[in-house]
Image (spheres, grey):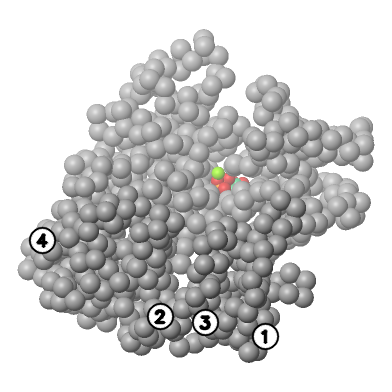
Amino acid sequence: MNDLLSTPIEYLKGVGPQRGAILRKEAGIYTFGDLLYYFPFRYVDKTSFQKISDIPQTDGFVQLKGKVVSLREVATGRIKRLEAKFEDGSGSIDLIWFKGAKWIKSKLQNLPELIVYGKPKQFGPKWNIAHPEMEAVSSAQEPAGGLQAVYHSGEKLQALGFTSRGFENIISQLLPQLKNQIDETLPPYIIGDLNLLSKEKALLEIHAPQNNELAKRAQFRLKFEELFFLQMELLMRKQITQKKLKGIKLTRVGEFFNDFYTNHLPYQLTGAQKKVIKEIRTDISSGMHMNRLLQGDVGSGKTLVALMVMLIAVDNGYQACIMAPTEILATQHYNTICEFLKNMNLKVELLTGSTKQSKRKILHEQLKSGEINILCGTHALLEKVVEYKDLGIAIIDEQHRFGVAQRSRLWTKNDLPPHVLVMTATPIPRTLALTFYGDLDISVIDEMPPGRKAIQTWHKTESSRLKIFQFLENEIEKGRQVYIVYPLIQESEKMDYQNLMDGYESITRRFPIPKYRVSIVHGQLKPEVKEYEMQQFVKGITNIMVATTVIEVGVNVPNASVMVIESAERFGLSQLHQLRGRVGRGADQSYCILMTGYKLGQDAKARLETMCETNDGFKIAEVDLRLRGPGDIMGTQQSGLLNLRLSDLSRDAQIVQLARDKARDLIERDPKFELKEHQNIANELRKILKSKPNWSRIS
Ligand code: ADP
Ligand code: MG
């Protein structure tokens, strides 16, 4: 059957060399197999139509059957459009084209009755559909079951007859040849368990479904297949990396860990913290290399987990480092860790871009000699000159800001690679985590330290400004502190700075010295000044911190109880959530106030509503995924690695999970694919692994 599927497309009946060339160029269809996998993106149900009179009650796309009764060309200013009045007996609607008027006119002339598909929009009392899909009723041979596949096409494809219908025609040439030609790739027990269609049946039904249910089952089978092999691939890669990569064995839980745990830990660990420390301990004592992602919402106490894990490394005679994306954060880690360890005999140091040359030299030497136990810092830790005596574990905080290349540099620091723990406060929806980090282990801190009150979030506009100032005054009166954050987007940097400075001025006018103190922090300040201002706020000397998003990540001031976000509509959801996470860190009731303009787009509204509704980072991440799509969240570079034809990571979460579970079961049962029923899978995987570069080594 491989022969058949790899046959060049021009040999298919009805294609030929010229049309074959356009299929290759415009649709990437080189072979019969490519055409078979050119799936329809939706179906038209030829048996069900809406009435024009019902349009105001519909939502989204409609399919109408009727006649064009008049045609005219209209010009508004320089924009011309073609307008067709379309009636179906229940009412009329305008069909509109801004392009291709000539072609549409000639097409409409010969159509007595037609089917129109599109999304109606309202303009005043009238409705119209712009650039609808159209088809003659007479030419539509009713597909069996009434469902017609619709394929993507384009101008150049259409010019050679590859309209959606044109694709349907050539596919109908191909399908009958496939009977008994498509090998099954999944073992019978999976097909049975999930009640899947056979691969052949699914490929036939997805193009020409007999009914709705079969269309759905065909899609399900093929999506499952796609995601299953993706998960198999990720798990295999993980196996391969682990086999190849022996890790440093950190078996001792000794003096430092125990001393800290019994004598210096200021509070009880949460259950979730205990759980992940245990997971990590199991990993790093196994003799395998650990590559683990630790997810925990802002404020869930990741720093403490990091510290305790570093103590295990020290207990075993190794060094540990923790790396943060900004100087402020690195410094804060350093201070936190020093505070935790102040009564213990350990050497903790800080290395950042602004560490003085003379100090640096000393640090480098002390690192090499092993004198330093724990090193905190920024990217500076990755520089070539930084050498350790024995680095046992590297912890990376807020992994989103580090590139893959930077992380991979840590590998060069040792003979045996240090264990890597990547910590992120940006909850990644499980679907994405399983897909993008499928070859990492994942730990989740899903519980907050006790005594936290849920942050109250409000959405406000300019008209409430005075009331909000009053509210801030009251909070400051109670001894609390306030953040006010302004957006700073590169493209509009100048204006943004202007807004920030204007805001700062009006705040200092409303909260004047000497009664109040206001700090300001932004990217154009010198690091020393920034640091000074931050420290003033951390120490509680300033009441209000006016800032750009430099404070987004990590900063910990438990006494701050209000976060005001200006122009909140300009921030993404995960960024808003991160910012909000700066408050609510103490025992007091905290508030987040989202200030916006009056006019908001749909997505902005959805973001603000989500923020007001929930504090749950994972829920927010799910919404974010729906609004933005996986590419934007993970970075297009990484999403390009996943060529998913059918599945949509934001909608098919359940199938991802199912695929993951089945893939894991299979590998556990038959890790070397020795069972006969797994031979197909082994073959398929060999193909996949061969065809892709090794991109999975993210740390
Ligand atoms: P994040 O996960 O955002 O990095 P942090 O590690 O900064 O969170 O912790 C947030 C705050 O919670 C800190 O003030 C920290 O001291 C405190 N904290 C951490 N663990 C606990 C615990 N088990 N009980 C009480 N407070 C805790
Ligand atoms: Mg943190």
Q: Is residue 191 visible?
A: no
Crowding around mark 4 (Cα neighbors within 10 Å: few <14, some 14 to 19, many 20+) is: few
Q: Which mark is residue 139?
A: 2
Instruction: Return the residue at label 1.
Output: 91
Residue 142 picture location, percent across and down? 37, 85
Beta carbon of the mark 3 residue lies under 8 A of ligand 1: no
Element type at mark 1: loop
Element type at mark 4: helix
Residue type at mark 1 is: Gly
Instruction: Return the residue at label 4.
Output: 3
Q: Identify which residue is drawn at 39% across, 68% down.
A: 164
Image position of 126 (left or right of 37) = right
Foreground tag (4 vs 2): 2
Q: Which mark is residue 112?
A: 3
* Badge 4 or badge 2: first in the primary sequence: 4
Q: Is residue 419 visible?
A: yes
Residue 382 picture location, percent across and down? 42, 26
Q: CA distance from mark 4 to mark 1?
A: 54 Å
Crowding around mark 2 (Cα neighbors within 10 Å: few <14, some 14 to 19, many 20+) is: few
330 or 217: nearer the eye? Answer: 217
